Image (cartoon, rainbow, N blue to C red):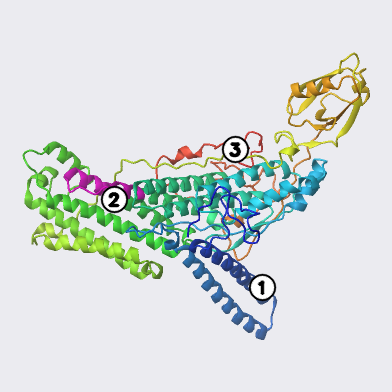
Amino acid sequence: MTETLLPTGCPAADQRGSCYFRKGCNPLAETGRSKLQNRRAVLNQQILKAARMRAGAENLLRATTSPKIREQVLLELSYVNSNLQILKEELEGLNISVEVYQNTEETFSIPLIPLGLKETKDVDFAAPLKDFILEHYNEDGAEYENEIADLMDLRQACRTPSRDESGVEMLMSYYVQLGFVENRFFSPSRNLGILYTWYDSFTGVPVCQKNLLLEKASILFNIGALYTQIGTKCDRQTGSGLQKAISAFQKAAGVLNYLKETFTHTPSYDMSPAMLSVLIKMMLAQVQECIFEQICLPGIRNEFFTLIKMAQEVAKVGEMYMLVDTAMNQAPVKENIPYSWSKLAQVKSDHFRALAHYFVATMLCDHQLHQADDEDQQEKAFCQLYDHMPEGMTPLAVLRDRSQRKQLGRLHLHKALLYHKEALRVCSLCTKLRNIEILQEILSVAHKRSLLKYTHQEQIDDFFSLVSAPNILSHTNHKIELIPPLFSNVRDLFERLGPPAVFSAKQRWSPPRFIRFYCEDGQLGFTLKGGPPVQVDCIDPASPAALAGLKEGDTVIAVEDTDCKWLGMSDVLEKLQNLSEQEIEIQVISCQDNAPSLHNKCATYSAGMQKTYSLICLAMEDERTDKAKKVTPKLSFLSWGTKNRQKAASTLCLPSAVSGTSAMKKKLTTPFTLFNTDSSLY
């Protein structure tokens, strides 16, 4: 059941040893995870078919006036709606199939929540890119068939990444490659007409758009999702496994936060700012849970200060899951988040808060203040547990008086039992959670342990038996940080076109001109500058090169049959001087004025998508107002640019659960940021 690939890859089934899959891709792995993803792809197609049938029935219902036809359409519409609801419930069941993604070894840990990968359709880059190369770069597009094939193979491999670092590296390499492709082929004055289709990870609703930024955002989402699957796969019974899980979930949160900050008007529910904020909270809560498990791994000493520390650490886990549960139950996230995820977050919140009260009760019931103990240190640590003490009690009196310690300890055990019962109740109400045996077992064992300790305590019938135990203040010594994505340097597949800072879709060049000339007395008659590629700086108007048509500002792209787009000034001069005694032929191009940007009027098709924030603001530049006042043009729905933090901040964004995440707002650099100057891209 392993998904680890050898460095050379896996041999294809139809070619014995002669062909290998790309490293990081494993399309033939018949694992539970791959079968789950395949089932997700089938469900997406069925949901799309049902959504189209519903749309057709609704259109017919609005168009017809015949009572008989309307009755038949309404009957068919009710059937389609029922079928669509069943399909969406089945997709939700796949999203909560957390046991498939967990470590295969037998463990006694509560399952973690991974994200499923977004599915997509095939895309053919061949014809559009060849036409663009011929028209824009004046080169034969057929000469770049291998590069285009490599790009399409890389995209196809990204649909089935392996669940390890090589799979993440492959997805990141494709994301970086998309930056190169965007710079070279996607002109602001021309739409290539390539249609990208991606399915929502939660609802299965397809989003179709002739915009490369949908592709980039979806790949980023899959990178974050793959990190979550790597984190759930780790063995949480070992220190190294827990550390890998912590790192994976931190990286997942960093990628999702980068997606939220970079692409601000995403047309898909799973990539909306509100949904991404919830997913980031969930990843950080799972990081905190793994940190707590890492602290517990060597064992918990039944010692005063250790129990106080553990109580505050586990209270922090419960608090973070409480924030996740609250965020999941807010609109519009509530309508799209899997119901089982929300209930699992609530179960974990109650479970970990019950553990916090159990640790405090153990500290109070099992330990007494002796003369050899440091009374001041114990009082200080005990005071940090609560924001207030129960009426009639003081920290020092509780530590000194055995009776008060027992009373307060029993109150904490009673509250722990209430939380345990609530966790078991919520778990029993959710069908998906009821089927997770390890979760049921862990909750039952914790409840029985608290109940056993509670029954061993003496019953005290006095005023304190009616008082509720105070809430435990959460605290952790481990700082959780988002780990931003680190994009590695990737070779540009289309580097033969020339340096990307010069030969881009935004810069137009004239067709190549052939200049043939002789040197006079070993002198070229012109000087060069810059590079690569080099440009003609100063030229003698009477020189043979000038008379042959060479102009100041021309860019030299070839000397004889040697391509010079990537050569510096010294290399080009050396080649010219070596040919000084014979006729020299060079190819040059001239910079032309850039074509004005055209308004992007391509629409987004999203079958079955309700009217949400992403469909409200499709603005057109050619709208005219009859009033004399100035109107600030709205951002287009398809303008995925860098967010104007004062004016374009979405009101649907939820507050961050962890302080200190503002440091993530700074711009991250990628290998293609240096030559990309269009602010609408990032």
Q: Residue 187 location in percent, x, y?
A: 74, 43
Could you tell me how far apart the alpha carbons at marks 2 and 1 are, in whole angstroms?
Answer: 52 Å
Question: As drawn, is 138 to the left or to the right of 444?
Answer: right
Q: Is residue 617 at all visible to an observer of this figure?
A: no
User: Which residue does the numbered mark 2 point to in the structure image?
Assistant: 315
- Disc 3 is placed on an element classified as loop
Mark sitting earlier along the chain (2/3): 2
> Is the C terminus in the top left, top right, bottom left or bottom right quadrant?
top right
Kindly report the secondary structure that dominates the magenta region of the rendered protein.
helix
Q: Amino acid at mark 3?
A: Asn
Mark sitting earlier along the chain (2/1): 1
Labelled pair 3, 1 in contact (Cβ < 8 Å):
no
Furthest residue in direction bottom, as rendered: 68
Q: Residues within 10 Å of mark 3 (few under 14, many from 20)?
A: few
Could you tell me how far apart the alpha carbons at marks 2 and 3 are, in whole angstroms?
Answer: 42 Å
- Disc 1 is placed on an element classified as helix
